[in-house]
Amino acid sequence: MKEKLTLSNLVLISVIFGLLLVSALFAGCTQSTTSTPATTAATTVPVTTVATPVAAATTAVPTTVVTTATPAPTYTATEGNLVAYTAASLTGASSSIGPAFTKAYPNHKVAFNLDGTQALKTQVEAGAYADVFISASNSYTNTLKSEGYFVNDSVKTLTTNYIIVILPASNPANIKSLSDLAKPGVKIAMAAGTVPVGSATMTVLNNSAKSTYGEAWKNSTISNVVTYETSEPAVATKVSLGEVDAGFVYQSTAAASASGTYKTIAIPAKDNYLQTYTIGILKGSTNKAIAADFEQFMLSSAGQQILANYGFTAPKTS
Amino acid sequence: MISRRLLPKKYRRNLTYLAAGILIAGVTLYLALPILALFIRISPDMFFETVHDPNVISALWLSLFTTCITLAVVIVVGTPFAYYHCRYSYPGKVVVDTLIDLPLVLPPAVAGVALLVLYGRVGLLGKYFNMFGMPLAFTTLAVIMAQIFVASPFYLRQAKSLFEQLDPAYEQTARTLGASSLRTLTLVTLPMTATGLISGAVMTFGRALGEFGATIMFAGNLPGVTQTMPLAVYVGMQGNINVGLTISILLVIISFTIMIAVRLIQKREAERA
C-alpha cells in the first residue's frame, strides 16, 4: 500500500512539473518579443562574467513568473541596461567607461562581456544577445557585417592601437632589442592567430623580418613562443607574472599599466600594424536607442578621453 | 491521498507507467541529444577532411600520450599509496583523506593558478627548478602534472575504499601459509580488487582526457606541446568551427570506446566470479 501511495504522488509531482515546464516555456516565448531579456541579462550578470544567451534566457524565465505576482517592472524609455560585447583589450578601460556612461546618461547601465573578439564573434553567430559590439578587428567586423548581424550604418571606427613588446620589469632574459627575441631559450607569449592581436603580431613579425631582421630571426622568434593565448590580457598576465620573458600586446596595455610593471620595446611605426577598433549596434538589439546613446558617448570627447587615458590612439580623422 | 481514492486501480498503474516512461525518455534524450547533434552538425566528408589537419592530429597524440602517462603514474604511485594508507593508521590520516578529495571539488581553473603559483618560473618551488635548468610551466610535463592533480582523486578514492572493504583475513591467511607480502599483494589483494581498480582508472583517464582549466592556466596553449584536445576544441570554436567539431567527435568516440571496454571487462569478471 505504502509503495503505491508514493507512486501516485510521483505521478502528481511529475504532472505538476510538466505543467510548470510548459508554462515556463510559454512565458519564455512570449517574453522574447519584449525588451526584458536584455534587461535581466544586464542586471543579473556582473560586469566581468560572460553573458551567454542561454544564461540570459534561463534567468529571464523565473523572473517573468515572479513579475506576474509583483507590480510591473519600472522600465521607462529613459532607462536601460545595455549588453556590450567588448574586445578583451578594453578590459581596463571598461571599468571606467561603465561608471562614466551612467554618469552621463543617468539610469543607463552597461554590462560588458569581455573576451577575445574571435570568441565574441562566435558567440554572436551562435545567437548570443548583445546590444553593442566593440571589435578589435576590422576583418571580424566586416565578417559580422556581411553576415547581417550589424545595423550597418551604425558601425563606426572607435579607436586604434599599435603592437608593442612587453617584458617583465626584472627582464630575466636580458632583452634589449627586438633582435634579442630570437635568442635561444627566450620564452615568448603571444596571442593565437585567431585573436586580433595575434594576427597583428604575425604581421609585425613578417614586416620586421622583411625590413630589418630577416626570415631566420622570425623563425627563431616564433620557435621561442611557449604559449598562444586566447586573448590579449592573457598574454599580458603571463608577462606580469614573470612566467615568460616577453609578450606581444597592444600599446594601450603597456601605457595603462602601473609604472614598473613592464619594460617595453617599441616596434618602429613602419613595421608596426595599426589595429582598428570598431563599435556597432547589433540588429538583434531591443535597446537600439540606448545603444545609440552609448555609441555616441564612446565617440564623444568624453569617451575618447577615457580611451586616451588607457593608452589608446584616437583614429585619424580623414 | 485524494488521487488514490478518485482513480481506479488500473488507471493509476497506467499513469505510473506513463510517468516513468516520460521520465526515462526525457533523461535519455537530455543526455543523448547533444552528442547526437555533434554528429549531425558536421558532414562525414568534412569530418574526414578535418581529421587530417595537423593541429587535430597533434592534439590527438598529445592528449593520448599525456593521459597515458598520467594514468601510469597514478596507478603506479596511487595503488601502493592507497594500500598503505588503508592498512596503517598514522597521525594526520584524516587530513590526508580530506586532501585526496580536495581536487574533486576544487575548480580546475583554481588548480591551474595554484600549480602556476607553486611551480611557475617565479613560483615558490618553480624558481628552484628553474635554477637547475628544468622549467616546469608551459611544458608537456606541466600538462601531465595538471592532469595528475585534477584526475588522481578518482583512482585514489576508489582504491582506498576497495582496500578498506577487503577483508584482511584473506591476506592474513596467505601470509600464514607462507606467502611473502609482495606475493600476497600480487596474488591475493590486487586480483580481488582488480575490477574496481580498473573502473577507478577509467574515471581518472576520462577526467584527465577532458582536463581544460588547469592545463590552459598552468601549461599554456602551444600546438603540439601543450595544446591537448579540449584546448584545441576551445581554440577551434573561435576560429575554424570544423576543427572544434571534429575533435569533439573524436573525444566522444574515445570516451565511448573506453566505457564499452570497461563494461566488457567487468562483465567477464562478473561471469568468472
Image: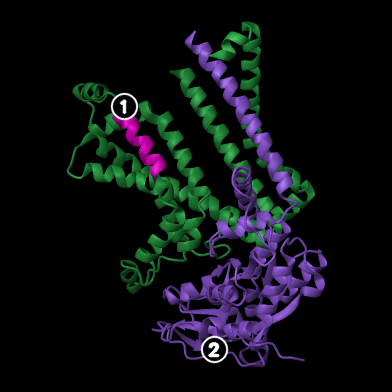
Residue at figure coordinates x 73%, y 60% from the top left: A286
Residue carrying label 2: A179
Q: Quadrant of residue B83?
A: top left
What range is drawn magenta here?
A: B153-164
Q: Secondary structure at mark 1?
A: helix
Q: Are marks 1 and 2 in contact (CB under 8 Å)?
A: no
Residue carrying label 1: B165
Q: Is residue B225 above or below residue B194?
A: below
Quarter occupied by the C terminus of chain A: bottom right
How far apart marks 1 and 2 lie (CA) works out to 64 Å
Residue nearest the viewer, comparing B193 with B91: B91
Residue at figure coordinates x 41%, y 41% from the top left: B154
Is residue A115 visible to us here?
A: no
User: What color does chain B have in the rendering?
Assistant: green
In this rendering, position of residue B85 left or right of residue A265: left
In this rendering, position of residue B222 left or right of residue B133: right
Q: Chain of mark 1?
A: B
Instruction: Measuring from the top left, give residue A254's x and y in whole percent.
Output: 51, 84
User: What color does chain A have in the rendering?
Assistant: purple
Q: Quadrant of residue A307?
A: bottom right
Discs 1/2, front = 1
Residue A98's disc number: none
Residue density around tag 1, few if under 14, some if 14–19, many if 20 or more, within 10 Å: few
Residue nearest the viewer, comparing A125 with A240: A125
Residue at figure coordinates x 61%, y 90% from the top left: A213
Q: Chain of mark 2?
A: A
In this rendering, position of residue A58 left or right of residue A150: left
Is residue A84 visible to us here?
A: yes
